[in-house]
Amino acid sequence: DEWHWAKALAAEARARDATTLHLAVGERSGIQEDLLLEALRKLGITAIIEEQHALASCVCGYKGRPTAESNCPHCGNALRIASGTEIRVLRYE
C-alpha cells in the first residue's frame, strides 16, 4: 500500500541525505500516485512522479500496451506484462 511504500522510500532517501525523490511509478503498480505523494509529504519527503506506461508481449509476437482485459489483441492469449508494474527511484536530491 502507499503508506508502506512511502515509509520505505523515505528511509532510503534519508540514508542518502536526500529530501527529494524522482520516481517512476508503473501504471499497473497498484499505487495511487496522489496518496503516495501525500504520504511522502507527511514524512518530510518531496516527490516528483512520472507515470511509466505498461508494456506487454505475447507468444504470437505482439508487443505493445496491454489491453484492459490483459489478452492479446491479435491472438487472444494472455499477455505477459513486461514493464509498468514497479516503482523505481530515478534520482535522489
Image (spheres, rainbow, N blue to C red):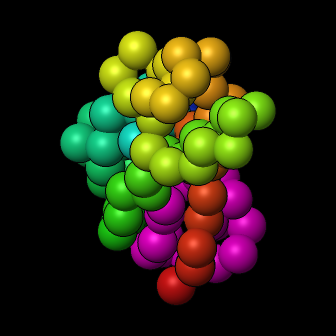
Q: How many marks?
A: 0
Q: Is residue 11 left or right of residue 76?
A: right
Q: Position of residue 64 (x, y in %)?
A: 50, 49
| Quarter-of-image position of residue 59 | top right
| Quarter-of-image position of residue 48 | bottom left
Q: Is residue 68 left or right of residue 88?
A: left
Q: Position of residue 61 (x, y in %)?
A: 69, 44
Q: Is residue 20 magenta?
A: yes
Q: Is residue 11 magenta?
A: yes
Q: Is residue 58 left or right of residue 28?
A: right
Image point (61%, 58%), residue name: 88
Q: Magenta region: which residues?
A: 8-24
Image point (35%, 22%), residue name: 68
Q: Position of residue 56 (x, y in %)?
A: 59, 41
Image point (50%, 30%), residue name: 74
Q: Position of residue 54 (x, y in %)?
A: 49, 46
Q: Residue furthest bottom?
A: 93
Q: Is residue 7 visible?
A: no
Image point (62%, 16%), residue name: 77
Query: Where 8 falls versus 32 (above or below)?
Result: below
| Quarter-of-image position of residue 92 | bottom right
29 and 55: which is toward the camera: 55
Query: Where 43 falls versus 5 (above or below)?
Result: below
Q: Is residue 49 visible?
A: yes
